[in-house]
Image (cartoon, rainbow, N blue to C red):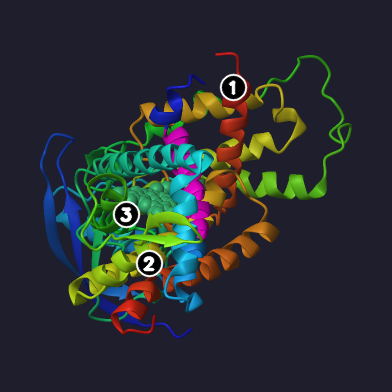
Amino acid sequence: MEHYNMNLTLKVWRQKNASDSGKFETYPVKNISSEMSFLEMIDVLNEELISEGKDPIAFDHDCREGICGACSMYINGRPHGPWHANTTCQLHMRAYKDGDTVVIEPWRANSFPVIKDLVVDRSAFDRIIQAGGYISVNTGNAVDANAIAINKDNADAAFAAAACIGCGACVAACKNSSALLFVSAKVSHLALLPQGNPERKTRAMNMVAQMDKEGFGSCTNTGACEAVCPKEISIENIARLNREYMMAGASADK
Amino acid sequence: MKWSELFTSSIGKKWVMALTGLFLIIFLIVHAGINACIWANDGGVMFNKAAHFMGSTVVIRIAEIGLFLGIFLHIIQGLMLEFQNRSKRKKGYEVPMGNKGSKWYSRSMGLLGTILLLFFILHWWHFWVPARFIGHEELTEIEINGVHMHNMYNLMQYTFQELWVVIAYVIACISLCWHLIHGFQSAFRTVGVSNSKYMALIQNVGIGYSIIISLAFAMMPVSMYLGWV
Ligand code: HEM
Ligand code: SF4
Ligand code: FES
């Protein structure tokens, strides 16, 4: 694709801290290369803000290669911007043309409170994982990796579910602020494998209980989560979790 | 899981919605089947007999209690879900997502359901309340094969002479169609069908069911208004 430069207008959510009410600020950015990444474009703007003595825009990022899930931006009405199966850090400026206006907002959900500007607190996800996203492994010699036969389809489905990077785009996209795609990916990933069997029931029940405690909404299968998920986690996982949860709940003693 | 979690946990609530929704889906087949007797072209004899059977059979009267419980659970749970889910994002987006990723009707189940609820009130007032409790001057008595029964057919014909009533019923049927196009397949996902082979089938059957049932119901007032039966 041919290289070009562009001038854009950014409308960015600025909020000093969790208790500040926050507002949009408009910034013109000039001479942005089509080969830059979206975050590099923000870096350029931040350099300018710093040289003018202003507070740079705070945003989450770490790997910048689509694997850590840190970069959370809701861009022109879509989490992670316009591209399919993509993270914000992997979005490139060739998605835009000269003169475009780009509105950048943080994830919005009560369970993801804004800390500063575009940075939200996603520790609710960590607590959900702590509630059941683990397996028991005996100590002693490492078992040969091929000692337990696993059906190929299950292995593939578990692997696909394990691809979830916990970015929270599913929550950001959902009209109910439901975290069910994330939780279903975490539960499916272990429920499909024999290694996940010992904690199978408590995992489904405890992770869902923690999810509810964190204040996420209830899923109504709209599919917005699946559409924006950078890792293409399928909503089939949600159906699997619904089943896991009810089976576990119905057969539990309490 | 405690029993109460069926009504308090997010997935428990989904199950209640799905099971009551599926129950209503089955009920609608029976309801549409009986009402389709108006098209028998016999001056309402077959329809009146069918309606009498439904109203006078003990087992069906007991099932009716279950039906009302199911409807009320679905409505109350549905409205609570809608309000609770809306409260989970106090500050919304400047640029809404709109149709990027989901269909309008899947996001409008609460609205479509509320239109259905308003319709139910009208519908019960038109037929169920007169037949069970207070009677109606157009709900005459007739005798078919020596059995005395209500002439529900007559009440239907009387009710559907009013244009606004026909329009209200047709609007309700359109809402029902959209509610079901999302609801039918969603209910199966909710009860745990994750197999893509079945989901493809369920999706198509759901669309077919929604259109056929809604069209059948909508044609009843229309047929009577236009004097086809
Ligand atoms: C004969 C009438 C009705 C039928 C056949 C029906 C059927 C269904 C079905 C199958 C679902 C999907 C459940 C799921 O996703 O697991 C559903 C969802 C829903 N219904 Fe109904 N429904 C009816 C009337 C109503 C009424 C009167 C209301 C409310 C006043 C209502 C409110 C809702 C809501 C809010 C949902 C969304 C829940 C969700 O998507 O998970 N419905 N309905
Ligand atoms: S399911 Fe997808 S959108 Fe949700 S947290 Fe995981 S990777 Fe992100
Ligand atoms: S910064 Fe790691 S996924 Fe975007």
* Relative vertical location of residue A123 with respect to residue B34 in this rendering, above or below: above
User: Which percent across, then down, holds residue A56?
Assistant: 20, 50
Which residues are the magenta region? B10-30
Q: Residues within 10 Å of mark 3 (few under 14, many from 20)?
A: many
* Relative vertical location of residue B108 with respect to residue B193 in this rendering, above or below: below
Q: Residues within 10 Å of mark 2 (few under 14, many from 20)?
A: some
Distance, label 2 to label 1, CA atoms, is 36 Å
- Sooner in the amino-acid sequence: mark 3 or mark 2: 2
Give the chain letter at badge 1: A
Which one is nearer the viewer's eye here, A205 or A58?
A205
Question: Tag 3, which secondary structure?
Answer: helix
Q: Are marks 3 and 1 in contact (CB under 8 Å)?
A: no
Amino acid under label 3?
A: Gly
Q: Which mark is residue B144?
A: none
Which image quadrant is residue A250 in? top right
Q: Which mark is residue A202?
A: 1
Give the chain letter at badge 3: B
Q: Nearer the viewer, mark 3 or mark 2?
A: 3
Amino acid under label 1?
A: Thr
Left-right relation of B215 to A152: left
- Answer yes or no: is residue A63 visible: no
User: Which percent across, then down, holds residue B76?
Assistant: 31, 39
Q: Are marks 3 and 2 in contact (CB under 8 Å)?
A: no
Residue at (17% x, 37% y) in the render = A17
* Relative vertical location of residue A94 with respect to residue A242 in this rendering, above or below: below
Q: Nearer the viewer, mark 3 or mark 1?
A: 3
Q: Residue furthest front?
A: B146
Q: Where is mark 3, residue-wise?
A: B113
Q: Residues within 10 Å of mark 1 (few under 14, many from 20)?
A: some
Question: Tag 2, which secondary structure?
Answer: loop
Q: Where is mark 2, residue-wise?
A: B100
Left-right relation of A131 to A111: right
